[in-house]
Image: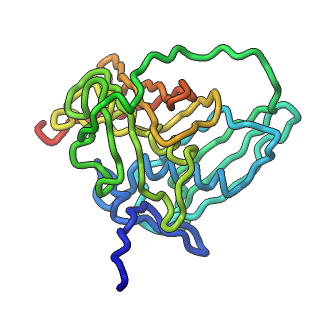
């Protein structure tokens, strides 16, 4: 007898023309728009699809979100800005129809064996922690599992959490650790928010990831906090790690605006 095959949640469907967002990609700040995490993960997918020169390693991804990204067909375009012997810079444009909605730059540096100087890493292993619901209802239909260390998305202040994702970014395509890391790079402003979302919104305008190396494994740590001068914008700063240590650090420029209760 046939058995029921569980459905795997996904953010996009790949088509010949581009990528169609699913309802799960919904932005928490705007109706009928795509959230920053799925956008960053889609940029990561486009980077993998491009198969840049394997003699170079990704050291920075800078993603500018150019307004509200609609839940409509998204079409990528890639062009080389610099192709040097030591460094390369690639531009990725994401269009909704004729409108440019996201602009990303990928900086790559040539591979060379050099002395390591790793970032400090002093976090409990996820296997030693209990699983919880750190993100409350934002679980991608329970495909996102979390093990909290500090704070919470409803608690302003520094937050630290291990995240595991069994969902797919592109329907029918298992997501790599790199693509998942791109998605989790958008989580800093929620994990380490400085205000309550009901009082002040804190949508991000960009996502910048500085990679030390490529991520590995299935559990990803986000350790984030937000700082602001009280003038309408803020900076979320994040440390990203896997079981082997810190693989990247990141920032997000935050647009602060009155929340629903104000």
Q: Nearer the viewer, residue 96 or 122?
A: 122
The picture quadrant where one finds residue 6 is bottom left
Q: Nearer the viewer, residue 123 or 230?
A: 123
Q: Nearer the viewer, residue 233 or 123?
A: 123
Q: What residue occupies the far front of the structure in this picture?
A: 1
The reply, left or right, for residue 252 in relation to residue 208 is left
Q: What residue occupies the far left of the structure in this picture?
A: 261
Image quadrant for the N terminus? bottom left
Tell me what residue is drawn at x 52 percent, y 64 percent: 74
Tell me what residue is drawn at x 51 percent, y 50 percent: 41
13 in relation to 203, above or below: below
The reply, left or right, for residue 16 in relation to residue 153 is right
Q: Tally the numbered discs.
A: 0
Tell me what residue is drawn at x 42 percent, y 62 percent: 10
Residue 157 visible in the snapshot: yes
Q: Nearer the viewer, residue 24 or 139?
A: 139
The picture quadrant where one finds residue 156 is top left
> Residue 137 appears at what percent x and percent y?
22, 49
166 in relation to 14, above or below: above
The picture quadrant where one finds residue 219 is top left
> Residue 67 appears at what percent x and percent y?
43, 49
Q: What residue occupies the far right of the structure in this picture?
A: 85
> Residue 78 appears at what percent x and percent y?
69, 55
């Amino acid at each position: 007898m046939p058995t029921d095959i569980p459905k795997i949640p996904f953010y996009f469907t790949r088509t010949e023309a581009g990528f169609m967002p699913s309802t799960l990609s919904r932005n928490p700040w705007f109706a009928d728009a795509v959230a920053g995490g799925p956008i960053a993960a889609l940029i990561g997918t486009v980077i993998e699809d491009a198969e840049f020169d394997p003699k170079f390693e990704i050291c920075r991804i800078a993603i500018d979100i150019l307004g509200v990204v609609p839940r409509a067909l998204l079409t990528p375009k890639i062009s080389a800005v610099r192709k040097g012997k030591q460094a390369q810079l690639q531009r990725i444009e994401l269009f909704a129809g004729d409108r440019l909605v996201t602009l990303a730059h990928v900086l790559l540096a040539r591979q060379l064996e050099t002395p390591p100087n790793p970032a400090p890493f002093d976090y409990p292993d996820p296997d030693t922690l209990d699983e919880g619901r750190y993100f409350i209802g934002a679980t991608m239909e329970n495909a996102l599992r979390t093990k909290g260390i500090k704070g919470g998305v409803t608690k302003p202040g520094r937050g630290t959490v291990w995240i595991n994702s069994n969902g797919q970014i592109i329907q029918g395509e298992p997501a790599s650790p790199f693509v998942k890391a791109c998605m989790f790079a958008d989580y800093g402003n929620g994990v380490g928010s400085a205000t309550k979302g009901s009082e002040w919104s804190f949508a991000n305008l960009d996502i910048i990831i500085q990679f030390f190396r490529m991520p590995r494994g299935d559990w990803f740590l986000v350790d984030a906090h937000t700082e602001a001068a009280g003038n309408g914008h803020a900076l979320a700063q994040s440390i990203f790690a896997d079981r082997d240590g810190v693989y990247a650090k990141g920032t997000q420029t935050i647009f602060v605006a009155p929340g629903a209760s104000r």
